[in-house]
Image (spheres, helix red, strand yellow):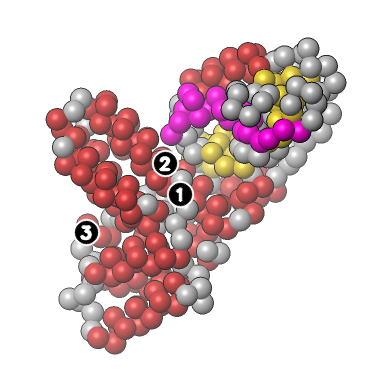
Amino acid sequence: MATCHTPDEGVPVGISACLMGEQVRYNGGHKRSRYCLEVLAERFRLEPFCPELAAGLGVPREPIRLMGRPGEEPRVVGTADPELDVTERLEVVSRDFAEGHRHLRGFILMKGSPSCGLERVKVYHPNGMPSHADSGAFVRALRRHFPELPLEEEARMNDAVLRENFITRVYAYDDWKRHVEADPGYHQLLQFHSRQKYLLMAHHVEAYRELGRYLAEASKRPLTEAMDHYLQRFMAALARPATRKTHANALMHVLGYLKQELDGETRRDLLAAIEDYRRGHVQLAVPMRLLNHYLKRHGSEYIRRQTYLDPHPYELGLRNAI
Ligand code: SF4
């Protein structure tokens, strides 16, 4: 699944424009991300967007910040002049962006920004004191108008687990876009679930069971309703990072498909590799590589089609780090 796009096309992923090195910050600066530009750009077709620029705030501009009380939707106002309220302008451009960019498979965000920050953006009380934290205005609009879109902050991608999780979601969503959304049908939906089963199990075993039960009855529902429900639940489940324990569980299930074909010694080697991984002695790439080796020779077509075995480009080395 991970290799279906040619490098020329790339998987379309949005990105805060300042991370691309564009000088769009309030002070005319940028926050160029080497990882995005030198590694991810090899695979993703990065599409920069600056919501504050799109809202007509200009460069340079007065810095803005979130203001409000806990439990309220924060306003976006000028730092020096709280009378400057750009909440509605940002909401309109963010909604238009979400509606005009349904082709995206993910969005990489700049941390801490009152527009682009994914989480933990400071909200100030109307009296000027820091009060609590929330997401930026652009992020809240994306969640509202494009809830299935995978989101991550560039800075959080320094964490190998979060990085692997985001890129896994991008490719899973890409699979959905190209094979289910482009050609909607109950059959395509069931096929998608069938090849994503062990990936889903590694992330969220309860959602794996629940969605299996849901699909057994799905043909009684209107197709659009079934697809919407499935996609929202599936993407939310994948957003929960898999752990060593949940990966080990999924690996054991995959190993079950080789039971008859392997001799006792080979099976013990595979079990030892999974156990070493579960205990944190080796990275996920180790048992995965061994399993893939034997599945290639002895695995049924069903198990070899599992996206879990190859969820993103091998060259990114993501499973060497988790
Ligand atoms: S609004 Fe977003 S893209 Fe624009 S400068 Fe701020 S963080 Fe960067």
Position of residue 186 relative to residue 63, above or below, is below
Q: Is mark 2 on a helix, strand or loop?
A: helix
Quarter of the image holding residue 129? top right
Of the pair 143 and 198, the residue shown nearer to us: 143
Q: Nearer the viewer, mark 3 or mark 2?
A: 2
Q: Name the residue under label 2.
A: 236
> Is 42 on the left or on the right of 133, as rendered?
left
Residue receiving disc 1: 240
160 sits left or right of 303 in the view: right
Q: In terms of secondary structure, where does tag 1 sit?
A: loop
Amino acid type at mark 3: Glu
Q: Where is residue 79 drawn, in percent x and y?
A: 81, 23
Q: Which of 145 and 261 is in front in this view?
A: 145
In 3D space, how far apart are the residues under numbered discs 1 and 2 (Cα atoms)? 7 Å
In-front residue for pair 3/165: 165
| Residues at marks 1 and 2 touching, judged by CB atoms closer than 8 Å | yes
Q: Mark 1 CB in 8 Å range of ligand 1?
A: no
